[in-house]
């Protein structure tokens, strides 16, 4: 009898600027996908307004009716007072749990006695930090993306009771946030008059080195990896470490196929390494898994043949 | 406003104190601080004499313990907090919640400052660290405009320190993983951005090439000056020709803004550069001491002297200086 717990699957927040119709079509599809949780909301740039808070909540209701656990995700970098007010409205939505992506959100939620999820841009690197956050009301945390399997082992050993662990298992890695918009800069546009150029880059804008190697992806004020982190081949280790949830970060195309591959591997219908191989061609550029193996994040350590 | 200056070693510390810094900040010679470079920082004996030198002259010493320990390293960070308390530093500058929690529980009399690496850009975030750990001061990331700094200071539960001069992080500090993505070490994990061991220079037929972790971050023609490679200051291609896709190699200089920062209620100005030479620390401290004294005397009539700007211009990274995010020509 196999007693290894089975991780659940989540769809992370859409990190890119997609038009309203694109988001509607995407979540129509998500409603029927074999995932357990869906994170909704804008986490990168306050100027992206395809959906208002009420639109997210409406989609939350529909996805909840389809059996998904719904979480609303907040912004990672808060600068203007207006952004803080919007975050407050999100925290006080009264319906769905919130993923805090800045300590400001943690404070707003903790002060209201609301349980919350700590997203990947909250720096939780050691057990004592986890325990501080558990006392503040954290019920789930997402492993910071630069941490390795070894670090996760140590963190899981002293994980506070009742706290779930989620790992970004598939997606371009969020690596940095700035006050500046690099997509606007690429077009020689000022941030305040950016012409919403992120709409033209539904997977981010790939940045190449001077010898043509894909390196980073510009996503407005966020900088991502050009490579897509994929930990599907490491599913056995993730399960053995009792990771509760594997997150799939949405991409413009093929998200459903990515979900299916993860689902089949989790259900034991497909060997994880074979599943991982099947995903390599669906990524904007290609795979990486270095952070998980304690190497530079862009490295690909596992064999993908 | 207080002047807080960098001390990467004992000569720099003495230079800062001699030229009128109100406080110096320093770190242990290991990964517990965010300027973990070879040949830099203090062993315990050096720190003891540095602290004595400053405190005997009525200045304060802040110890940066501002990286994020992982489970394996936790005991080293914990021991470093205990050592800092025993050494009698005037404040601990920390970023990690675990470190702050440990320090506030075991050394309740040791004042805590939230490091810029703590990444707090808004009052709610500051409230969290104030309520849970009793921090007395926070250093703001270099991403806020002057207006946003005003908003934060006006409703902050703690004193606010801002960067006045030095290298410019264009990414919000504490949440930038670019260095570990290419080279395996980041400010959060190892206290360093662009580890020297991963930097390689090579003269090629196309120009002088520099790589970090094997990634070509830039290539320089003969007439171009080549700076130390950080990913955010490299040149890349997004479709067309290579350009500074993220940030030009410039420095921050906020001398022009001193009157506004005073009126906003900023408590302290921080000078970046523990990795720089004692001569840099001496020159920059001297200029900023004069400028802060002048700003206090002259209020809104304050205008930076040309000779100050030229000294700062000479020691700045790259040749230009900018107002960074405080002023936003690009917004």
Image: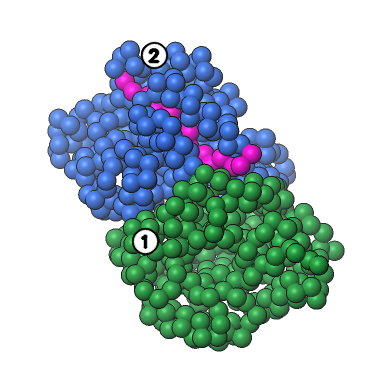
Chain colours: A green, B blue
At a point 45% along the width and 15% down the height, the residue shown is B48
At a point 44% along the width and 67% down the height, the residue shown is A98
- Which quarter of the picture shows residue B292? top left
Which residue has dot 2 on it? B52
Q: Nearer the viewer, residue A137 or B81?
A: A137
Q: Position of residue B203 (x, y in %)?
A: 70, 39
- Label 2: chain? B
- Label 1: chain? A
Q: Position of residue B225 (x, y in %)?
A: 55, 38
Neighbour class for label 2 at 10 Å: few (<14), some, many (≥20)? some
At a point 52% along the width and 50% down the height, the residue shown is A130
- Distance between the alpha carbons at the discs numbered 1 and 2: 46 Å
Q: Is residue A186 magenta?
A: no
Question: In the displayed structure, would residue B46 be above or below residue A30?
Answer: above
At a point 33% along the width and 44% down the height, the residue shown is B130
- Which quarter of the picture shows residue B303? top left
Which residue has dot 1 on it? A113
- The mark lying in front, picked from 1 and 2, is 1
Q: Position of residue B186 (x, y in %)?
A: 58, 43
Question: In the displayed structure, would residue B122 be above or below residue B197?
Answer: below
Q: Quadrant of the C terminus of chain A?
A: bottom right
The count of marks equals 2
Q: Quadrant of the N terminus of chain A?
A: bottom right
A164 to the left or right of B164? right
Specify start and end residues of the magenta stretch as a single range: B59-72
Q: Secondary structure at mark 1?
A: loop
Q: Is residue B61 magenta?
A: yes
- Which quarter of the picture shows residue B162? top left
């Amino acid at each position: 009898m196999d007693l290894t717990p089975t991780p659940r699957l989540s769809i992370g927040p859409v990190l890119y600027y997609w038009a309203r119709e694109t988001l509607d079509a995407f979540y129509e599809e998500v409603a029927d996908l074999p995932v357990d949780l869906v994170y909704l909301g804008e986490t990168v740039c306050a100027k992206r307004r395809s959906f208002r808070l009420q639109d997210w909540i409406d989609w939350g209701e529909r996805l909840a009716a389809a059996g998904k656990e719904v979480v609303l995700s907040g912004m990672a970098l808060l600068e203007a007072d207006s952004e803080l007010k919007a975050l407050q409205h999100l925290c006080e939505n009264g319906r769905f749990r919130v993923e805090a992506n800045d300590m400001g959100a943690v404070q707003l939620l903790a002060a209201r006695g609301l349980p919350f999820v700590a997203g990947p841009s909250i720096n939780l690197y050691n057990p004592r930090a986890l325990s501080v956050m558990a006392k503040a009301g954290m019920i789930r945390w997402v492993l910071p993306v630069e941490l390795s399997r070894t670090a996760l082992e140590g963190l899981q050993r002293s994980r506070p009771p009742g706290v779930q662990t989620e790992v970004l298992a598939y997606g371009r890695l969020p690596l940095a946030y700035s006050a500046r918009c690099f997509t606007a800069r690429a077009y020689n546009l000022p941030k305040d008059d950016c012409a919403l150029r992120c709409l033209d880059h539904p997977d981010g804008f790939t940045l190449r080195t001077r010898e043509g190697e894909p390196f980073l992806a510009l996503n407005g004020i966020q900088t991502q990896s050009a490579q897509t982190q994929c930990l599907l081949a490491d599913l056995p280790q993730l399960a053995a470490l009792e990771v509760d949830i594997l997150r799939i970060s949405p991409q413009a195309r093929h998200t459903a196929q990515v979900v299916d591959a993860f689902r089949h591997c989790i259900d034991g219908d497909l060997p994880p390494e074979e599943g991982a191989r099947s995903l390599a061609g669906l990524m904007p550029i290609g795979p990486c898994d270095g952070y998980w193996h304690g190497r530079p994040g862009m490295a690909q350590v596992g064999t993908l043949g | 406003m207080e002047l807080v200056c960098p001390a990467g070693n004992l000569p720099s510390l003495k230079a800062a104190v001699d030229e009128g810094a109100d406080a110096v900040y320093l770190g242990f010679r290991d990964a517990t601080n965010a300027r973990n470079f070879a040949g830099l920082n203090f062993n315990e004996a050096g720190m003891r004499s540095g602290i004595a030198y400053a405190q005997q002259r009525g200045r304060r010493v802040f110890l940066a313990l501002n990286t994020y320990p992982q489970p394996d390293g936790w005991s080293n960070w914990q021991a470093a907090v205990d050592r800092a308390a025993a050494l009698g530093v005037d404040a601990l500058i920390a970023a990690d919640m675990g470190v702050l929690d440990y320090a506030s529980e075991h050394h309740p009399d040791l004042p805590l400052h939230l490091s810029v690496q703590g990444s707090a850009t808004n009052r709610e975030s500051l409230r969290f660290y104030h309520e849970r750990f009793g921090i007395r001061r926070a250093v703001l990331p270099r991403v806020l405009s002057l207006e946003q700094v005003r908003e934060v200071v006006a409703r902050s539960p703690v004193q606010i320190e801002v960067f006045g001069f030095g290298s410019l992080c264009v990414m919000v500090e504490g949440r930038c993983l670019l260095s570990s993505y290419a080279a395996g070490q980041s400010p959060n994990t190892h206290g360093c951005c662009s580890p020297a061991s991963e930097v390689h220079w090579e003269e090629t037929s196309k120009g002088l090439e520099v790589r970090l972790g094997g990634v070509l971050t830039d290539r320089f023609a003969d007439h171009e000056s080549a700076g130390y490679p950080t990913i955010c200051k490299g040149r890349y291609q997004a479709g067309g020709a290579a350009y500074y896709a993220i940030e030009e190699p410039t420095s921050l200089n906020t001398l022009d803004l001193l009157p506004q920062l005073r009126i906003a209620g900023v408590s302290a100005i921080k000078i970046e550069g523990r990795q720089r030479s004692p001569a840099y620390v001496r020159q920059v401290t001297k200029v900023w001491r004069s400028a802060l004294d002048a700003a206090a005397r002259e209020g809104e009539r304050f205008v930076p002297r040309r000779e100050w700007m030229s000294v700062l211009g000479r020691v700045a990274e790259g040749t230009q200086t900018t107002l960074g995010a405080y002023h936003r020509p690009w917004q």
